[in-house]
Image (spheres, grey):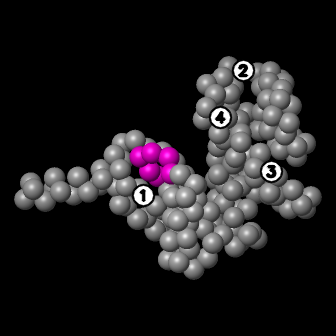
Amino acid sequence: MGNSGGISASLGGRYAAALFALASEQKKVPGVETELSKLKTALAESPDLKSLTTNPVLSRADAKRAIAAVAKSMKLDALTANTLGVLAHNRRLDQLSAVANAFAIMAATSRGEVTAEVTTARALTATQSKALAAQLKARVGSDVAINAKIDPALLGGMTVQIGSQVIDNSIKTRLYSLANVMKG
């Protein structure tokens, strides 16, 4: 599989690559991808889970027990749960979001998709997401998976990053450009 060097070189990318290899072997890539996405969402929404993954004082044993309880309550597959256990044992739970992101990119690549990091001021509706994916597909020539992020500081518009290409159509950038032009 042709991962970009940046993904597999990062710490989270190495864990994701190992997980991806196991998930591919066991034909569980879609399920693991879904579970990692749910974990990433839970991590963003739960201060307790965030604290669990970033607490340097928590012992390895306590972290493993706590993350096992999280995995059980979320009814995660053994493969995903075991990966969480390895992350806890190695004191790398803080890499969970990076693992989820890298795994999603690897899964999309294996399906022939390109991942677009889309940042907007407000959440996109399903219709807007679908229309944007169609526009981006026409531009890049392959299916596009959208990884949506919200940044209210953009004020409006969006930024889209596909690989090293960035399209910045945010109101924040437009106002900044206008201010620079007016300074003369």
Dominant secondary-structure state across the stretch colored magenta? loop
**C-beta proximity under 8 Å, tags 4 and 1:** no
**How many residues crowd mark 1 within 10 Å: few (<14), some (14–19), many (20+)?**
many
On the rendered image, what quadrant is the C terminus found in?
bottom left
| Label 2 residue SS | loop
Q: Which residue in the protein does label 2 denote?
A: 58
Name of the residue lying farthest toward the front: 127
- The region drawn magenta spans 119-124
Give, as a three-letter code, the residue at label 2.
Answer: Leu
Mark 3 vs 1, N-terminal side: 3
Q: Which residue in the protein does label 4 denote?
A: 43
Q: Is residue 97 left or right of residue 154?
A: right
Instruction: Give 46 or 85, whichever is nearer the viewer.
Output: 46
* Residue 103 in the image, given as x and y percentages of width and height: 71, 55
Q: Is residue 106 left or right of residue 77?
A: left
Q: Quadrant of residue 106?
A: bottom right
| Label 4 residue SS | helix
Q: Residue at x 55, y 70 (%)?
A: 134
Q: Is residue 40 left or right of residue 166?
A: right
Q: Measure how far apart labels 3 and 4 are at the Cα level.
A: 16 Å
Q: Measure how far apart labels 2 and 4 are at the Cα level.
A: 17 Å
Q: Which residue in the protein does label 1 denote?
A: 159
* Residue 25 in the image, given as x and y percentages of width and height: 90, 62
